Amino acid sequence: MGKEFRGTVADHPDFDAGSDAEALYDAMKGFGSDKEAILELIASRSNAQRQEIRAAYKSQFGKDLIDDLKYELTGKFERLIVGLMRPPAYHDAKEIKDAIKGAGTDEKCLIEILASRTNEQIHNLVAAYKDAYDRDLEEDVIGDTSGHFKKMLVVLLQGTREEDDVVSEDLVEQDAQDLYDAGEAQWGTDEAKFIMLLGNRSVTHLQLVFDEYQKIAEKSIEDSIKSELSGDFETLMLAVVQCIRSKPMFFARRLYKSMKGLGTADNTLIRIMVCRSEIDMLDIRECFRLRYEKSLYNMIQDDTSGDYKRTLLKLCGGDDDIAGEFFPEAAQIAYKMWEISAMTKVQVGDPHVFFQQHALYYPLCRPRTDEDTIIDIVANRSNAQRQEIRQTFKSLLGRDLMADLKSELSKNLERLILGLMMTPAEFDAKMMKKAMEGAGTDEHALIEILVTRNNQEIQEMCSAYQNAYKKSLEDAIASETSGHFKRILISLAQGTREEDPADMARALEDAQELADACNADSGDLEDRFMSILCTRSFPHLRRVFQEFVRCSNKDIEQIIKKEMSGDIKNAMFAIVRSVKNQPSYFADRLYKAMKGLGTDDRALIRIMVSRSEIDLFNIRKEFKETHDASLHEFIQGDTSGDYRKILLILCGGED
C-alpha cells in the first residue's frame, strides 16, 4: 500500500469478485439474511473491490446488489452497508442530496463535505451528482442557501484551490495583512476577502498565512473568525481553517460531537466512517485519542449496538486504549506540542520601582482603600517586580507592605493579592501549611503542589517552610498523613526526582516491572509504583507509560483506577496526568474548583497565582477544549467583585 496509506481498510489479498458476489448472494437468499457474513465481507474489501463485486453480482445473478442489500437490511445498518457499496463520489452526492432535500437544510453536512474534499474529489462529486440526479449541484446549492454562506460554498464547489505545492512566499505576509485589514482592523468585515483567500489559496500557503496572521493580530485566525463572522458562514469558515490545519483533527471533532451527550448523530457517524476508512482513519484515531483521552473504538462501542456497531468497529480498525498500537505515536506528538510551553505575558512597562512603590502607598493611606489601583499594579507586574516593590516599600517607608495589604483588604481578594506578592516558594509553603492545619487535611492540595513542582521549586519551598514555620516540611507531612500516602508525599518532598532524558532500555525495564507488579500477588503494587513514579524524570516516565501499554495492553491510568484507592490512587493518578499533560491536569483542577454549588477558592487562587507566569495560556487552551467553555467564562460566572476582576486579569483573555 505504501507508507502514505493511513486508512484502516485496504485491498483484500487473494481477492475474487465472483466468489465474493456468490457469497453475498448466498447470505441473502432464503428466509432472512446472514448479516454477520455480509458485514464481514463488505467491511474487509476496499471500495474499488466492492465495485468489482457489484459488477460481478449483476453479471452472475442479473440483479443490482445495492437493491438486494436495501431489501434485506434495515435501519442504520442498511445505511452503513449501502454507503460502503457506493463509489466515494456517489456517496458524497447522496449525502448532499439528502442534506438539501425537503423543508430544512443540513448545513453541517454541506460544510463537512465541501470544506474537506480535494479538488479532484469535488470534481468527481459534481459529476456524480449530475449523473445520479440529472441536476446541477451548484444550482441546487444556490437554491437552498443564501448570503455569504452560499458564496463560499459556490467557491468551494469550483474545486479550483491551488495545489499544495503552490506557495507564494511574497504573498504570505500580504495575505495575512489583507485578512487582518478585512476584519480586526476595521469596523465591519470584508467577507469577500475572507472568501477569496480561504477558498482559493493552497493548504500549505494558508498554513503559513495563519502563522503570520497570529503575529500581526496577536490572536489566531480562528478567534478572529469567531469575533468577526456569524451563523453558518462562521461555522463554514472555521471548518475550512480546521481542515487546512489538520483534516484528521477536524474529523475527530466531528466524530466526537456526533456521539457525545444524549442520542447519536448517526448520519454524521456513518458518513465519516465510510468516507475516511481508506484515507486517514488511523490519523483520526490518533487525534481522537489525544484530544478526548478516549479511543474512537471505545466511544463507538459505548454509543452503538448490534451489527451496526460491529461494522463501525471493523471500519475503525482497532482500540487504541487497549492495543496501544497507535497511542505511543500519538502521545509523542502530543508531548512535543505540550512541551512547547507558551508563557502568559506579563505587561512589564518601565516605570521606576520608586513610582510603583508610591503608587501602592497612596491608595493604602486613603480613608478608603483604592482596590482598583492595587489590583492594577499587582496583577500587571511580574513576581520578580513585586519583590522589588516589597523591598523598596520597606526601605523607603519602614513599613511591611504585606502587613499593610492584609489590614486593608479582606477575604478572597486579600488571599489572592497576598499570594501574588509572595515569592513562589513562600506561596507554596503557605499553601502546604494551610492544607495541613486545622481539623482536616486537604490531601488534594498536598498532591497538586508536590506532584507538579520541579526539584528546585520543591527545595526552595522546603527552605521557605522551615524559615516561616520553624519546622521541616517533611516532619509536618509525617505528622499529618500516614501509610503509603505519607511515604509518597515524603518521597516527592525530597526534591530529588531524576532529571535525565528518557533512557529507552531502562524505560522498557521499568515498564515491565510495573506490568509485573500488576500481575503479582505479592501485595507490593504501591511500593513498586512509588519506586518508579516518584523518582524517575518526567521525560523518562513518558516513555515508560508508552512502553507499559505495549507490555500490558492497558493504559497505566486504567490500572491505577482499578487497583488503587483513596489518597494513594489520587497521588499516583496526579503524577501520571501531570507527566502526560500538566496543563490538562491543572485545567481539570480548576474545573473541579468551580463546578457545582460553591467554589473551592483556595484551589482557584493557588493555581491562578502559581501558574500565571508559567503555563496559564496552555491551561486555558486545555480548559476550553475539554469543557467546551472558556476559563474566563467560568471565572466570570463563579466569582464576583474585585476578586473576580483580578482573576480575570491573571486569566489573560477570553478564549
Image: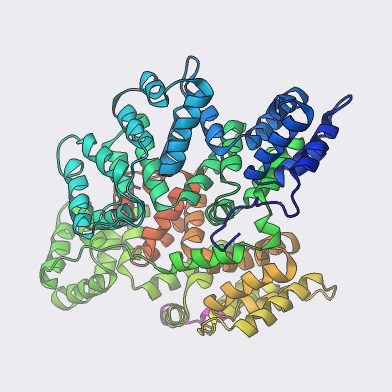
Point out residue 201 in the picture as x, y percentages from the top left corner.
29, 48
Type of secondary structure dominating the magenta stretch: helix
Point out residue 534 in the picture as x, y percentages from the top left corner.
60, 77
Answer with the quarter of the image where residue 20 lies.
Answer: top right
What is the span of residues highlighted in magenta in the rendered image? Answer: 467-475
Q: Is residue 163 shown left or right of residue 181?
A: right
Look at the picture and state if 107 lies above or below 339: above
Point out residue 504 in the picture as x, y percentages from the top left corner.
60, 82
Q: Is residue 125 shown left or right of residue 650?
A: right
Q: Nearer the viewer, residue 102 or 555?
A: 102
Who's the residue at 44% across and 52% down the image? 246
Q: Nearer the viewer, residue 460 or 287?
A: 287
Look at the picture and state if 190 lies above or below 209: above
Who's the residue at 21% across and 62% down the image? 347
**Residue 473 on the magenta segment:** yes
Number of on-image labels = 0
Residue 5 appears anywhere in the view: yes
Point out residue 512 in the picture as x, y percentages from the top left corner.
72, 77
Query: On the rendered image, what quadrant is the N terminus found in?
Result: bottom right
Residue sticking out furthest to the top: 103
Who's the residue at 44% across and 28% down the image? 107
